[in-house]
Image (cartoon, rainbow, N blue to C red):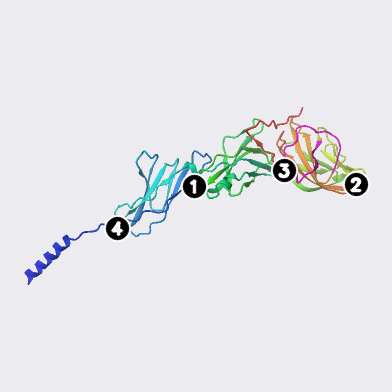
Amino acid sequence: MRRALMMVAVGMAIGACGEDVLPPALLPAPENLFYELEASGDPDAPLGILLFWDFVDDPNLAIYRVYSRVSTTESFGLRGETTSPTFHDGGDPDLEYFVVAVDINGVESPESETAVIDERLRLESPASITSTSLNGAIHLAWSDNPFQNEPSGFKQYRVYSASYSLDDNLCGEFWSLEGATVSPEFLVGALDNGIPRCLAVSAESIEGWESLWSPIRADTPRPDARNVVMTALSIVSDSAGFRFWQDVNNDGQVGALELGVIADGNRGDIDFRVTTDGTALFITPVRAGTSITLWEDGPIDDLTSIDFAPLDGYSTVVRQALPGWGYVFEMDGGDGFARFGAVRVTHVGQKYMIFDWSYQTDPGNPELAIGGGAFTAEDTGVVVRRR
């Protein structure tokens, strides 16, 4: 009996050796490989690339391996390993990438689809840009052509700014990211009045390709105020005078309490006074070096309709205060540079007028409102010295 059992065992062993032994099943290839570049502000030099793919749901999964190559004439090489279904590759990305899943025995899955980092997916740049000078801010608006021409590939706009030298008509060397938006407009806030800035916008694709920049715009925030009331000199003299800026402490700096000063209309150091002939109100320049001109021969929509102050045409001629009309003032800053201010009258009564005003604190800078920015590629000659 024992001999028979041994023969049966040997027979079973021989039978087993005759069967095919299957290797462990391969993990499935990672699917839906996608990439996103990290924009840097330089369209030709992204900060890096981030790869994404679907998680391989298998208990035998150990890691993923990422392979890449810099050109189609070279072989793929191992770029890195990760346990996450994402991979960050810093610096200038390679041309092509693929991913494999690796099991606990070190066996690789089939390759994923290859992600080709195709520069042709870059969007076109915004064709034009305008700006509005505001109190402590600059509002930008630009052409929406990158989205309109490639809506399925559009991700967002990126807004950049740098310092600006009005005298040299040059932007600073260092640019910073102000923010991103999906709409063709952006409010750059928390800015110092009277400090010029250069601004530009790029369009970013869903893959992270950044377009060339829009034209560069230069603009300068300036203080303003709305619904200021002044009385006619013969009615209440204490509120008949106005001074855009009065350097009370003689420090050469524009303090908040030194702007838009309502004063006695009999003073000789005010910029203008309001008078009446009994039927109409009039704006009269007062202090030496202050002159006035009409913005347009008719009403304007808003104070921000007044952009660059005219460089000539000023006089000390008395102007009638008319509702909706705009007036621009050129004033002597006392330092060899002109100062510019704007007024838009909103209401005229028999005894008083209501108006909005703006004032550019930057010496010699005529930027006052919408469109006031200068394209830095052009020599605008916007620094105005007193003669």
Q: Are marks 3 and 1 in contact (CB under 8 Å)?
A: no
Tell me the quadrant of the picture where the C terminus can be found: top right
How far separated are the C-alphas under marks 4 and 3? 72 Å
- Residue 89 location (% of width, % of height): 43, 45
Mark 4 or mark 2, which has the lower sequence index?
4
> Is 313 situated left or right of 169 in this image?
right
Q: Is residue 310 magenta?
A: yes
Q: Seen from this angle, which residue lies furthest right?
A: 278
Q: CA distance from mark 2 to mark 3?
A: 29 Å
Of labels 4 and 2, the one closer to you = 4
The answer to whether 329 is drawn above or below residue 206 in the figure is: above
Q: Could you tell which of marks 2 and 1 lies nearer the N-terminus?
A: 1
How far apart, in angstroms, are the residues tagged by discs 2 and 1? 67 Å
Compared with 183, 335 (above or below) is above
* Amino acid carrying mark 2 in the image: Ile
Q: Work out whether residue 225 or residue 40 is closer to the camera in this orientation and state it.
A: 40
